[in-house]
Every structure is written in C-alpha cells, then in structure tokens.
Image (cartoon, rainbow, N blue to C red):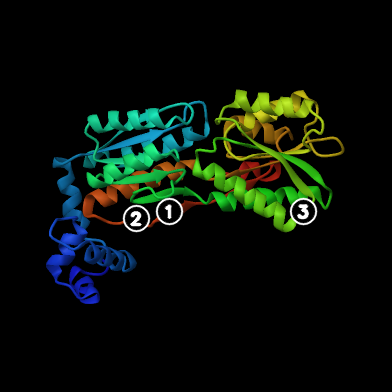
C-alpha cells in the first residue's frame, strides 16, 4: 500500500472518516471536499489493501459490460482479444463480460445496446462512445447511478467517465503527416483524407493532427477533401475509386480510421500502387491481416498501429481494480503509436 487514509486526511485537512466517505463514494460529504480528497488520493497513488477484498469478490462477482461499434472493422478483433484475456485472468475472482457490438455509428442503437447490458445487471461499462448528445446524456445517467464507465479506443468531450484507455489520436495524425512529408520530399501533392465518422472524436483528432502537420511543415501538400467511410472497406473502396477517376485526382491518401483495405484495393485496381511517378502513396492505421498483406506487397506505404490488445486488456484491468478497492485510474491511459512499414513489419505488433 502507498499513502494511507491517515496521511490523505492530514494532507487535505479533513477527518479520516471524511476521507473514507470520499474514497468509497458514500453520502454525507460536501462535493467540493470529496473532489479535493479524490484529487490528493490520486496524486499520492492511494491503493487500499487488496488481498482480502479480492478474495471477497468470489462472493460478489463483477459483470463488466462492453459496447463497441466494431462490426466490419477487423481492428476490433485485437481489442476483443485483450478484453477476453483480461477477463479470463480474473475469472477465478468472479469477473465476467457481456458484449454488444454494432456496425456503424448510430447513437440510438448504441444507447439501446447499453440499456440491454444494464438490464443484464452489469456493474461497470467499457464503451467506445459516439460523440452525440444522447451518449452524453447516457453517461450522465450512469454517473448518477454510480456505475463506473471507461471510454475505450476513443473518448468523448464532456462525458462523465472514470477514465480513457486508447491511443493519442492527435499524435497519430501528426505522425502520418510527418511520414507523408518525408515521402513527398518537397514536391507538392494533392491528398485525399478518408475518415471513419465525423461523430467519432478520435477520428476527428487524427484528421486535425494530420492537417496541423501539413500546415506547419509541408505547405506544398494540399488536402482535396475529407470523406467518411463509416469504417467500411466497401465504402472506402467506392469513394477512393470515384476520386481516382476525377480530375484532379489525389496523389496521396491518408486513411484516418477503418477502410484501409478497401482503399488499398482501389489503388491497386487503378494500377497506381507503390512509390514513383504517377503512383499514389497511401498511409493508413492499424495492422489487421489484410493491412499486413498490402504492406508486404507495397500497395500500402505505411501504417500507424495503436496496440488494440492492450486497449482491451487495460480496460478490464482498470475496471477490476476500481471495483476491488476504489482505485482511481489515470484520466488517460495511452497506448503506443508505432509507424510500421514493410521493412519493420515482422517486428511490428501494433
């Protein structure tokens, strides 16, 4: 154990009983005092004695709900593998998982699926949130019900949640812009950006990071437009194919979310894959089997991984720790961005 309740009481100038009420989310404490106590506890790395509490969990199992807009996007297979591994490692302590998935980014369906999970009696939630007022209202409701929520893979501005587990999307977009700048080597290029959905904060942050990188260090690279793919390879294929048939056609493509394989197929079928005169450079994200294949064959120039397995695993771990003793996770638990090209593919595990 790190800092004690007695020490937190001394640092905050309140009684040990008040600290206990704050740490265990009990009534009878002023909200401002509670916020102060929790802030100090987090800064000091407070953790209570877990051993006895973990043993007691066998009599009080933890059911964690997970909702992801993941259907049709193989990236989330890695997230799911991490979730399942973390649950299996804690199964002896009564941890189990209820999973709901959907295709696309419909906030109404996301709310409905979360309510289905609540009806199953979940005590915590890992959510890949859509940025929409209905989701903000849902998070507010869950906060009032004292049900802990972690946002996973992408965050939501203004949402009541325990913390966020995922990548730094702005940094990922900056890295993509930097890679394209190096590839351009001072030459002007027309760039088409394909993103998943304007309703997903992470996707928007990637595009913003990419824009910043081009504006600050590669003014000769101009963005033709930003189009949504709904994380769907078929939609990405159709939109990029149409763009390649137009004049002026893109000379480079940045896929900021799902749909990388579909975009690569369009590039390949138009005979413009690879690097060189008349070729279209393409930068993507993640490392699914299809993306790996396109990297190996030189169709995809580079991709930026974000450790999906780790995102899933850490979400369960943090919710479990909070359930055991009220341990507060960091506001953001960030996974690593890693640039992968054909030459370092065998060692890349994003």
Q: Mark 3 highlights which residue?
A: 219
Whether the residues at callouts 2 and 1 have beta carbons within 8 Å, the answer is yes
Kind of element beneath mark 2 = loop
Kind of element beneath mark 3 = loop
- Regarding residue 86, the answer to whether it shows in the image is no
Q: CA distance from mark 3 to mark 2?
A: 40 Å
Q: Going from the N terminus, do you reach mark 1 or mark 3 first? A: 3
Q: Mark 2 highlights which residue?
A: 329
Residue 32 at x, y percent in the picture: 25, 65
Whether the residues at callouts 3 and 2 have beta carbons within 8 Å, the answer is no
**Mark 2 burial class by Cα count in 10 Å: few <14, some 14-19, many 20+:** many
**Mark 1 burial class by Cα count in 10 Å: few <14, some 14-19, many 20+:** some
How many numbered marks are there? 3
**Mark 3 burial class by Cα count in 10 Å: few <14, some 14-19, many 20+:** some
- In front here: 98 or 139? 139
As displayed, is residue 67 above or below residue 72? below
Which quadrant would the N terminus be assigned to in this image?
bottom left
């Amino acid at each position: 154990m790190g800092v004690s309740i007695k020490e937190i009481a001394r640092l905050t100038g309140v009684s040990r009983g008040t600290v206990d009420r704050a740490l265990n989310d009990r009534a009878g404490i002023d909200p401002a005092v509670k916020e102060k106590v929790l802030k100090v506890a987090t800064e000091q790395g407070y953790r209570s004695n877990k051993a006895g509490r973990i043993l007691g969990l066998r009599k009080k199992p933890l059911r964690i709900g997970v909702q992801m807009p993941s259907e049709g996007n193989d990236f989330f297979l890695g997230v799911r593998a991490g979730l399942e591994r973390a649950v299996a490692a804690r199964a002896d302590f009564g941890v189990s998982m209820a999973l709901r998935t959907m295709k696309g980014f419909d906030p109404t369906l996301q709310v409905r699926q979360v309510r289905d999970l609540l009806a199953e009696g979940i005590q915590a939630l890992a959510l890949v949130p859509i940025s929409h007022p209905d989701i903000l209202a849902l998070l507010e409701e869950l906060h009032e019900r004292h049900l802990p929520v972690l946002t996973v893979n992408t965050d939501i501005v203004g949402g009541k949640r325990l913390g966020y587990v995922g990548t730094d999307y702005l940094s990922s977009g900056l890295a993509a812009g930097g890679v394209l700048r190096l590839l351009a080597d001072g030459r002007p290029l027309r760039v088409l950006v394909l993103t998943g959905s304007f309703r997903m904060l992470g996707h928007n942050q990637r595009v913003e990071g990419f824009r910043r990188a081009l504006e600050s260090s590669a003014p000769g690279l101009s963005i033709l437009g930003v189009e949504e793919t709904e994380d769907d390879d078929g939609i990405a294929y159709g939109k990029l194919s149409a763009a390649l048939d137009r004049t002026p056609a893109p000379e480079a493509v940045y896929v900021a979310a799902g749909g990388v394989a579909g975009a690569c197929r369009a590039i390949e079928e138009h005979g413009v894959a690879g690097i060189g005169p008349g070729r279209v450079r393409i930068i993507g994200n993640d490392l699914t089997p299809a993306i790996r294949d396109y990297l190996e064959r030189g169709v995809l120039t580079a991709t930026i991984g974000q450790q999906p397995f780790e995102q899933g695993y850490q979400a369960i771990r943090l919710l479990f720790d909070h359930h055991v003793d009220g341990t507060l996770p960091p506001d953001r638990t960030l996974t690593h961005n890693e640039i992968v090209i054909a030459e370092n593919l065998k060692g890349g595990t994003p």
